[in-house]
Amino acid sequence: MSTPAISFRDLTLGYDRHPAVHHITGDIARGELLAIVGPNGAGKSTLLKAIVGELKPLSGSLDLQGLTKRDIAYLPQVIEIDRSFPISVFDCVAMGLWRKIGAWPGLGARGREEVVQALDTVGLAALAARPVGSLSGGQFQRVLFARLLLQDASVILLDEPFRAIDTKTVEELIALIEHWHGEGRTVLAALHDMEQVRAHFPQTLLLAREVVAWGDTKKILTPTNLDKSRQLTEAFVTHAHVCERDEERETA
Ligand code: ADP
């Protein structure tokens, strides 16, 4: 394998000391285009949050191989992003530059030009002055991708970037992801559409609270592995409910 960008060694992650994802060991190579798949509750978001530093390991280690937070761009699930903030499309995209240019409002003519170019790349140049709250879901996701473009990060993490987005936007954003891959960036995306993964993502990590399978997408997305991931996730959910009931009984 080429130089790793991210390494996991017996990594266990969780919330309030309750483990959510167990014993992950493996490496993500630099420049890899990796889909993270698995049923709801499998631990995909949890893993991305740990990589971006929002969640500390309960045990084991996560090594960013010398990369810093600055090198990582992260797009959380849309439901976690507040769109009521009164900000224009232009300013929202310009925020992607803050690491490069320092404190707001230091955006010079060059920065402005970069924002315009990024908006043009995602097909939104005409909407620069619009408040983000007035955009459709697809348009807003384009704004967030334009912001990622300006962050110019070597590792890009995307959490369900195509949920509830129109087909045309999905196609154009996938083209952008493939462009990032072509530039040698490392891209990880949590996804649920297996056809999308098969068509565009060479590598897949199949999760179900633990690693079910990890490697070449064609070898990983087999009916057997997908069944196994569903069964494992369901078993964890059932187990969690039983434990919760036990805890409730103890505290009653
Ligand atoms: P996925 O992204 O694959 O749907 P998640 O990473 O969101 O899965 O969730 C994995 C497990 O961690 C689930 O059991 C979920 O309920 C639990 N979990 C996720 N976020 C939190 C949180 N903030 N607090 C407590 N438990 C959480």
Image (cartoon, helix red, strand yellow):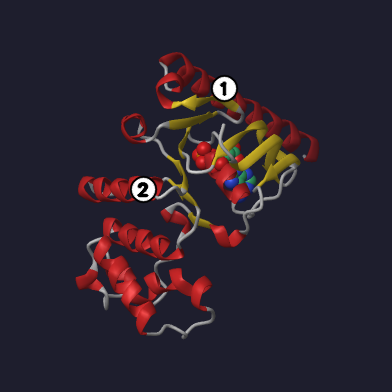
Whether residue 4 is situated above or below residue 183 in the rendered picture? above
- As drawn, which residue projects farthest toward the top? 224
Taking the spot 66% from the left edge, 37% from the top edge, the residue there is: 8
- Residue 163 in view of the camera: no
Q: Quadrant of residue 244?
A: top right
Q: What residue type is labelled 2?
A: Ile
Q: Quick one: 102 or 31, which is closer to the camera?
A: 31
The picture quadrant for ligand 1 comes to top right
Left or right: 177, with 29 as reference point: left
Label 2 belongs to which residue? 177
Q: Is residue 83 visible from the viewing direction of this image?
A: yes
Residue furthest toward the right?
A: 250
Q: Residue at 44% across / 68% down in the picture?
A: 96
State the image quarter where residue 144 is shown. Answer: bottom left
From the image, state whether disc 1 or disc 2 is nearer to you. 2
Q: How crowded is mark 1: few (under 14 residues within 10 Å), some or many (20 or more)?
A: some
> Which residue has dot 1 on it?
232
In this view of the protein, which residue sits in the foreground, 186 or 239?
186
At label 1, the amino acid type is Leu
Q: With 105 as the anchor, is 246 left or right in this view?
A: right
Q: How far apart are marks 1 and 2 (CA)?
A: 30 Å
- SS under mark 1: helix
Residue 189: % across, % down: 45, 43
Residue 136 pos. (x, y %): 26, 60
* Discs 1, 2 touching: Cβ within 8 Å: no
Q: Could you tell me which quadrant the N terminus lies in?
A: top right
The residue lying toward the viewer, choosing from 63 and 241, is 63
User: In the rendered structure, which disc, 1 or 2, sits on the residue that comes first in sequence?
Assistant: 2
Relative vertical location of residue 47 with respect to residue 141 in this rendering, above or below? above
Secondary structure under tag 2 reads helix
